[in-house]
Image (cartoon, rainbow, N blue to C red):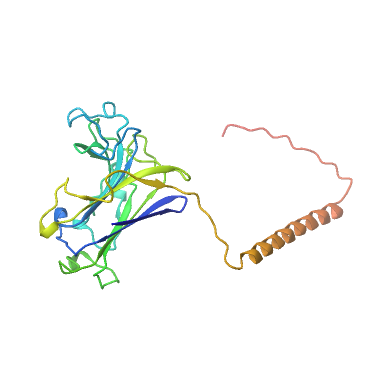
């Protein structure tokens, strides 16, 4: 798998490329490829055991597992049309959760594999302020129809054809989360991430723990500050910009001086008293 990431100062973008024969079974997520991203939130969150909290299903809470929170995005493509955007939508976000009823590109959090929940839903009850902040799409290089598919075109291609799966995702660097369910990223800051991929080997449905991983531990994710590069004629461009700046400043000074000279004299200035009122 090849993973690429960048940001534009507002959103974080990911591109995942996986070489694999085309496999798709409409409506059956476990017989289609699936991908997930995971980021640590809590200071004690481990890559192994999805956060590493030792509590069981009936005892894991935001208190008993505090510090083991991980943020996750999971995309199962069984109901997703290639090239279409899925994830956060008005209907699910209105209901205050990280679900996606259209394409199953969901926003999750977890403390371990047995304590994994959609944002806004968990052992402490539902919270109506949660959102699905992810958006994403998928594609496969065997597709020859670039004008766009519709649902009736499924399965979109023939099983077994060699090619590459492409997944694209985006999410804001920072979210409105107040429940430790989303990782927060800062420019010039460092974080970690993990990437998992499920595939129906020999046509057999995959199961939850049967995934491939890009690494056996966290991989670094550095949110570098933006930089600009000058073109080969950059020095001339800089000189021109400086000359333009001086021209603008000179023009402003000339206008100001002209105004001062032409302004009628002897008219006293009377300040107007103002008070701020509560509106």
Say which residue appears at 78% left-offset and 55% top-offset. Answer: 253
Picture coordinates of residue 98 (x, y %)?
Answer: 28, 44
Which quarter of the rendering shows the C terminus? Answer: top right
Observer-nearest of 247 and 71? 71
Instruction: Give the answer, above or below, for where 88 lies relative to 145.
Output: above
Which quarter of the rendering shows the N terminus? Answer: bottom left
**Residue extending furthest front?**
216
* Residue 81 position by quadrant: bottom left
Say which residue appears at 39% left-offset and 47% top-offset. Answer: 221
Could you tell whether 180 is left or right of 212 in the image? right
**Res 255 visible:** yes
* Residue 166 position by quadrant: bottom left
Picture coordinates of residue 45 (x, y %)?
Answer: 31, 35
Instruction: Give the answer, above or below, for where 74 lies relative to 43.
Output: below
Observer-nearest of 171 and 126? 171
Picture coordinates of residue 9 (x, y %)?
Answer: 47, 50
**Res 185 visible:** no
Picture coordinates of residue 42 (x, y %)?
Answer: 34, 34
Instruction: Give the answer, above or below, for where 70 lies relative to 149.
Output: above
Observer-nearest of 119 and 256? 119
Instruction: Give the answer, above or below, for where 18 lies relative to 69.
Output: below
**Residue extending furthest bottom?**
144
Could you tell whether 152 is left or right of 136 in the image? left
Say which residue appears at 24% left-offset and 70% top-offset. Answer: 143
Q: How many marks?
A: 0
């Amino acid at each position: 798998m090849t993973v690429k990431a960048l940001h534009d100062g507002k959103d974080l973008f990911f591109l995942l490329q996986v070489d694999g024969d085309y496999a798709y079974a409409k409506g059956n997520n476990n017989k289609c490829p699936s991908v997930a991203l995971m980021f640590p939130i809590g200071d004690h969150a481990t890559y192994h055991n999805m956060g590493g909290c030792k509590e069981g299903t009936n005892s894991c809470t935001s208190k008993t597992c505090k510090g083991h929170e991980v943020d996750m995005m999971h995309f199962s493509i069984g109901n997703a049309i290639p090239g279409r955007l899925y994830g956060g939508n008005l209907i699910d976000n209105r209901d205050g959760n990280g679900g996606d009823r259209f394409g199953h590109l969901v926003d999750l959090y977890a403390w371990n594999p047995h304590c994994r929940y959609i944002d806004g839903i968990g052992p402490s009850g539902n919270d109506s302020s949660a959102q699905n902040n992810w958006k994403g799409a998928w594609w496969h290089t065997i597709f020859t129809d670039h004008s766009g598919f519709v649902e009736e075109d499924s399965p979109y291609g023939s099983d077994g054809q060699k090619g590459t799966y492409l997944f694209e995702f985006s999410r804001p660097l920072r979210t409105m989360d107040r429940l430790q369910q989303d990782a927060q990223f800062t420019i010039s800051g460092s974080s970690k991430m993990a990437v998992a991929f499920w595939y129906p080997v020999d046509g057999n449905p995959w199961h939850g723990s049967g995934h491939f991983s890009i690494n056996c531990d966290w991989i670094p994710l550095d949110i570098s500050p933006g930089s600009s590069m000058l073109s080969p004629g950059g020095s001339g461009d800089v000189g021109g910009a400086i000359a333009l700046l001086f021209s603008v400043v000179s023009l402003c000074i000339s206008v100001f001086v002209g105004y001062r000279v032409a302004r009628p004299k002897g008219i006293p200035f009377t300040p107007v008293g103002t008070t701020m009122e509560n509106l």
